[in-house]
Image (spheres, rainbow, N blue to C red):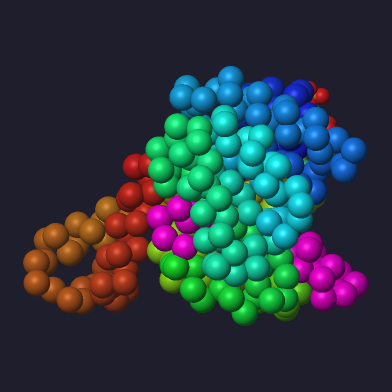
């Protein structure tokens, strides 16, 4: 999912040259206060111009629900029927449900299929939010996925940095990352890994995206067009992976009724079968 500042017509146009699953037009922290009003208009116009004929999902990151800008953002952009809303600094599933009620009203007003506007909460941006991650299933079908962020969280708790000496997340942020993963899984939605800020370091990004996929994330945020292909590649099963997954499934098909099997000297049981089926499904989608 590629973030694009909502006040930049040129970046919105540039985003057409790459193929993310979704773009996120930002009205929050990538837009300076003086440009917020103009960004709303730019995002609204883009949504109206593309409504009903989009080749990829278009999400909008509004300002946090606790600010006075949030409703103005929704009032402006909902007429363009965005595919989803990114909710920054989401404090709890209850707060996400509240956004859902607003969407109910705007969908009725603007002739949008009720319930079709999805929500992607940024679910770890405050200390309070960390203790509310267990109940995101309560949000219901609007919940698109969960993502996490380390920058606002570290600012909120007064950290000097959120990175260790080798550039890796320090322990508090690894916890936020892990809890996002578990929270999303418990809510039966995907987890989207946070951004990799150093956008010229494609090797570092590939490694970070690889770790995210290894751990169970379904995708990753991009902030620069050059990051999109690297991330897409990292989340596409390799030919070897796919071949192995097919052999695992084949081994179970060939041995109906077997709960456990051996393949190449390794033990296989149900979790391996499920994992192999997921890889085949992921490859079919990409
Ligand atoms: N989406 C679309 N186009 C983008 C882009 C983005 N996120 N980031 C950069 N581009 C465009 C640039 O405008 C430039 O276009 P041009 O060739 O027509 O001039 C081209 O891609 C190359 O950009 P580059 O010069 O390498 O980077 P930059 O210095 O212009 O921009 C950032 C760097 C970080 C300011 C920019 O990538 C950006 O705005 N990222 C998104 C930030 C954001 O939304 N943050 C909120 C979530 S944390
Ligand atoms: Mg933020």
Q: Please check the rendered image and state whether residue 162 is part of the magenta-colored stretch, yes or no.
A: yes
Q: Name the residue at the top extreme.
A: 49
Task: Let me know if residue 38 is in the magenta part.
Answer: no
Task: Give the number of marks.
Answer: 0
Name above or below for residue 144 compared with residue 225: below
Q: Nearer the viewer, residue 243 or 204?
A: 204
Quarter holding the N terminus is top right
Task: Give the magenta-colored segment's residue range.
Answer: 139-167
Q: Which residue is more in the foreground, 73 or 86?
A: 73
In the image: residue 16, left or right of residue 151: left
Quadrant location of the C terminus in the rendered image: top left
The answer to which of 201 and 163 lies nearer the viewer is 163
Q: Write the residue at 78% across / 63% down.
A: 152
Q: Position of residue 197 (x, y in %)?
A: 77, 51
Question: Residue 99 sits in which quadrant?
Answer: bottom right
Q: Is residue 268 left or right of residue 237?
A: left
At x 54%, y 67%, the residue is 93
Can residue 209 be seen from the camera position used here? no
Q: Residue at x 53, y 41 (%)?
A: 106
| Residue 117 x %, y % | 48, 44
Q: Residue 158 at x, y = what percent?
A: 87, 75
In this orientation, does residue 49 appear? yes
Q: Residue at x 41, y 43 (%)?
A: 114
Q: Position of residue 192 (x, y in %)?
A: 57, 56
Nearer the observer, 227 or 1: 1
For residue 199, side relative to residue 65 (left or right): right
Q: Quadrant of residue 226?
A: top right
Residue 260 placement, left or right of 267: left
Q: Is residue 49 above or below residue 2?
A: above
């Amino acid at each position: 999912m590629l973030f694009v500042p909502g006040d930049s017509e040129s970046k919105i146009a540039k985003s057409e040259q790459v193929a993310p699953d979704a773009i996120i037009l930002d009205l929050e922290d990538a837009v300076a206060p003086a440009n917020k009003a103009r960004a709303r208009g730019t995002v609204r116009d883009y949504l109206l111009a593309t409504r009903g004929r989009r080749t990829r999902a278009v999400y909008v990151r509004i300002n946090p629900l606790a600010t006075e800008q949030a409703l103005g953002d929704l009032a402006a952009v909902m007429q363009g029927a965005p595919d989803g809303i990114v909710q920054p600094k989401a404090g709890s599933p209850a707060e996400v449900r509240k956004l859902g009620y607003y969407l109910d009203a705007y969908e009725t007003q603007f002739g949008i299929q009720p319930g079709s506007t999805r929500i992607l909460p940024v679910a770890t941006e405050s200390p309070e939010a960390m203790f509310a991650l267990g109940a995101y299933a309560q949000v219901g079908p609007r919940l698109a996925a969960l993502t996490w962020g380390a920058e606002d969280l570290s600012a909120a708790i007064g950290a000097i940095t959120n990175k260790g000496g080798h550039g890796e997340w320090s322990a508090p942020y690894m916890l936020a990352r892990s809890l996002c993963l578990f929270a999303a899984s418990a809510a039966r939605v995907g987890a989207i890994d946070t951004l990799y800020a150093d956008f010229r370091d494609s090797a570092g990004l590939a490694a970070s995206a690889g770790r995210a996929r290894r751990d169970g994330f379904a995708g990753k945020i991009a902030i620069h067009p050059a990051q999109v292909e690297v991330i897409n590649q990292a989340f596409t099963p390799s030919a070897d992976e796919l071949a192995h997954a097919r052999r695992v499934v084949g081994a179970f098909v060939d041995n109906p009724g077997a709960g456990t099997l051996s393949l190449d000297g390794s033990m296989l049981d149900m979790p391996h079968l499920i994992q192999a089926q997921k890889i085949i499904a992921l490859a079919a989608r990409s």
